[in-house]
Image (spheres, rainbow, N blue to C red):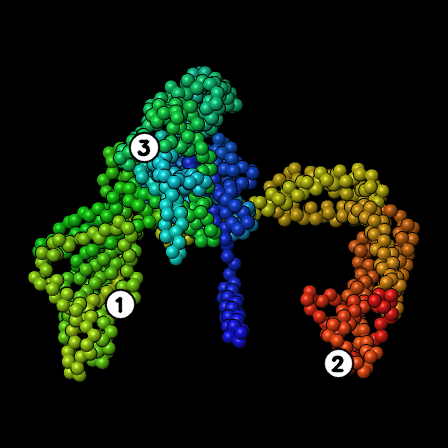
Amino acid sequence: MVQTKQSKVKKRSLLTLGAVAALATLCLDTTPVDAAVISIDYGTDWFKVALVKPGIPLDIVLNAESKRKTQSAITIRGNDRAFGSEALSLATRFPQDSFIGLKRILGRGYDDDHCVEYRNTFTNNMIQDQVRGTAGFETTAGVKYTVEELVAMQFALAKQQAEETAGEIVRDVVITVPPYFSQFERQAVLDSAELAGLHVLSLINDESAVALNYATSRTFPTEQCHIFYDMGAGSTVASLACFQDLTVKDVGKFNKTVQQVEIKAVGYDRTLGGHDIDVRLQKFLADKFQEQKGSKLSTLVIQNERAMAKLLKEANRVKQILSANIETMASVENLMEENDFKIKVTRAELEDLSKDLFVRVRGPIDAALADANMKLSDIQSLVLVGGGVRVPAVQSNLAAVVGEEKIAKNVNGDEAAVMGAVFRAASLSRQFKVKEVRLKDISLLPVEVKYTGEAKDTVTPGKPFVTPIFAPRSVLGTRKIMSFKRVTDFGFDLEYGQVSEAHEGELREKQIAHISLSGLTDAINKFKDVSVATPKVKVTIELSDSGVLSVQEAIATIETDGTKKATLADKVKSFFGGNDKNEDVKDAEPKKNDGEQENSGETKEQDKDEPAGEKSKDNKTEQSNNSTEVPGKNETVPTTQTEKVVLKVHTEYKGIVPLTTSSKKESLSKIQKLDALDVAKRAREEARNSLESFLYLGRDLLYRDEVIEVSTEEEREKLSESLSTVSEWLDDNEDADTVEFQTRLKDLRKLERPISVRAAERISRPKAFASLNSSVTMARSVGERLLTGEGAFHEPEDVQRLFDACDDVLAWIKEKETEQAALPLWKDGVVTTREIEQRGNTVEREMHRLMSKKKPKVTKKKEESTNSTEKATEKEKKDEKEASEESNPLEDGPQKEGETAAPEKAEERSEPVVEPVKHQKDEL
């Protein structure tokens, strides 16, 4: 028993120490944790935002218009910005300052086919960045913006929407991108997110996010494969994904079931989307308008920027209507030169205009099946995603390819991607415990390493080599280690390899980066006297989960050999088998992932020049190093050891280079300036709206009966004149400063407030008097019960203090009511409602004091036994105790079941002994 108590005390002490340590940790880190994470599904036409935080499940974030998605459009006119539907409306009036569908040109060069097509569709002033060669824009005000800056402003809007919903700062995000995005396009998305103040946990391919969302609500006892067919506004993608439940090892000896989503192959068409149909219909409507009004027009309609912008907007509306109807009317008021346009458009005409596009619908499906080496019979369903699949001609062509029975619409085509992405964000943030779904995604583009071999002499140059490092459909989130045998500093190039002929034209920029490694020459010179072999350089190249390439580290391994007199340090080192001066570098060397290969730069060529017996010498060295014999005093020690040197890695980006640090600072300053102007604009609009609202309320106030009763005619006339004056001023000064609006509103409130207060007090004051009177009367009755009620124990002088406070308040109420009744209604009251409510505080304090007083404890005196000569039996004692317990009505509280209270001696208690009054119950 003693050991048990000691162990309990020890355990309790340890728990206490643990709690103190945890508390200390919390006290050291007082930075608030922002647990909310979001996802952004950024599309050509729309973007959606989803949020998850503690207490709020995964859900879509609503915008300012309470809609679940926002148009990917922005208008910048001078210092004014507009987003979403407002920007889309302004696009027809200010097409040069409105930017729509930026996703298709993000991270692409000015001469790229997509940028050329953008210039042919929209009328913005597109310019070329002289440093990066990318496309940019110049507004009519002469301000230049990069595409990354414009996209960053839309990301910042998404961040703002999420923060208003979450009620806290949001930073972590997962953003969807098309699977065909190259290094340059993905880096542009990352740069835009950084400018928006977001920390990207990961990029995720659009259809992979849909597949993730598909898996979260289903189980897969056997493997299932589905094609997710996504036709958006700008492109079409068919992603073949396979799902299966796996049993894996959990903590200890337990197993758990997880789901695996594996992307097998992806087929795509970058120029097939709903926008292409809109453009076809836009040109059709322009031709019809030209036929109708050609003789009345001074120029061609296709040369009028505003007219073409209006027709493009109308074409999108007509396309959506024709998805559910066989015909509709296209109508645009004042299309050009005060000429209205109206014409009937049928679904057959639309399908005839886009028949060459509909033929291409099956292309991505065939490409995905071919890459995965699968047949249609291996696919369970074709899941439709995106707005473009709503076109009946698209669905009929898909049904002709896979069969009507395999067409599935069991996901939300608009929101599946953003919901899958926010699920991914929740699992990556480590703030949430979510269903474990393992995503195995792929990269579509092959990557090669190009380098020149080591020159054997000053005359003969090194040979050029090309080594594939990442093949098509390589798994994202993997690392490859490449080995080089070099004796001097060197570098190599990362480039995209050969792609299919169908996509060759899309990948204009193939050079990704040039990697320079330094520090090897200095290391060779340092160990040149003891080096025994050509150094090996291992370079770790990572293809991240976001699909971005980077060189993580480069480590040179130099084997040295020599003999020297054994020192004490050598003896100790030899005894313990130590042979590496850079153990920390060795531990930090990246481990190979499953399926990881070690690519050798010049391995074969260098192996031929290695001296015979090199391998056996290494084996002998290893045996010597592992020996546990302690050498003698003057004995020499084998000193063959491995020196590891971390080389410096410098990356020089090629092609479309990322934004530099200086350019990011400049862009951020530009965006922050617009943000500040937007804040000031919102404040000015709020001040103006407040003033305008008060003008309407003030006029209505003057005609209310309750206001007329408590005000003089002079007060009302003065307020009416002021309202009229300010109203006239507002009509002529709608663009006045915020301070002017606020000042005029303040002046009006000075005239209105006394009248409104009197009207409100006239109604609330009698109610406050009645409420206080009732409360004081009730408090007095409670005091009377404290004196005369059953079990009363309060002293009369204590209760009298309550009576005095009640009498004082009641007299005050009577006095103030008399004074108020004699006062005219248009005069301010003798007392306010708030003062009446506070007047009862003294009574409340006295009540609290009396009710908090504890009842004094009273103890029953122990009964003396009448029989002094004869000793009572054990049973009689027990009966006497039970009778004593039942006969004590003043016991302080009930005793626990099974316990017997021991009688106390009078001299042992501090309270005086009180003889209890005999009741009928005591006689029991």
Q: Residue at x 81, y 62 (%)?
A: 847
Name the residue carrying label 3. Answer: 378
Residue 865 makes an appearance in the image? yes
Dot in front, 2 or 3: 2
Dot in front, 1 or 2: 2
Near-viewer residue (173 or 745):
173
Q: Earlier in the sequence, mark 2 or mark 3?
A: 3
* Distance in Å between CA atoms under marks 1 and 3: 53 Å
Where residue 722 sits: x, y (%)?
74, 42
Q: Earlier in the sequence, mark 1 or mark 2?
A: 1
Three-letter residue code for mark 1: Asn
Three-letter residue code for mark 3: Asp
Q: Secondary structure under badge 2?
A: helix
Dot in front, 1 or 3: 3
Name the residue carrying label 1. Answer: 582
Where residue 40 sits: x, y (%)?
45, 43
Q: Secondary structure under badge 3?
A: helix
Position of 720 with respect to 65 (left or right) is: right
Considering only vertical position in the picture, is 90 above or below 571? above
Near-viewer residue (67 or 655):
67
